[in-house]
Image (cartoon, rainbow, N blue to C red):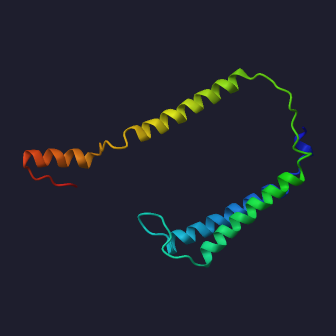
Amino acid sequence: MNIKSLKLLPAVLVFALGAVLTLALRCTHYFTVLEEHTGFFTEINAYVIAFYALLLVCVLFFLLIAFAGRKNYAFDTGSVRRPVSGLVSLLCGAGVFVSVYGEYSAKDADTSAYTVSSALSSSAGAKVTYV
């Protein structure tokens, strides 16, 4: 596969334009319709609909480009051993597993600083002020 044979300019232009427009719409959401603490929408207005419609158009464009040029994107399917790539993939997968396991293993144990300090203050009977 020759990189010069790929016609990536339309895809790059659509990606850049879509990124700029969706970023502008998302900033508009941040200042108008997003709830301050949770990040959920307080109302659905034209900006929200335009944001999701723009995302849909960009995704459909990339799908059409991928299917239209599938002969250009064909790779050699011969198997090649790449031990370094396999080792890096194994380490990344193990890191994701450890991260997810660590996140959900202590799900019921609340170890936040507020809980510890409030437990200490209630057992000692002292008044604690938070800065």
Residue shown at 64% from the left, 24% from the top: 87
Residue shown at 68% from the left, 61% from the top: 19
Q: Is residue 10 above or below residue 92?
A: below
Residue 47 quadrant: bottom right
Percent position (x, y) of residue 118? Answer: 18, 49
Number of marks: 0
Residue shown at 43% from the left, 63% from the top: 38
Q: Which is more toward the observer, 90 or 7?
A: 90
Q: Which is more toward the observer, 42 or 7?
A: 42
Residue shown at 74% from the left, 23% from the top: 82
Q: Is residue 37 left or right of residue 48?
A: left
Image quadrant holding the N terminus, namely: top right
Percent position (x, y) of residue 67? Answer: 86, 53
Residue 107 quadrant: top left
Q: Is residue 75 above or below residue 85?
A: below
Outermost residue on the bottom side: it is 46
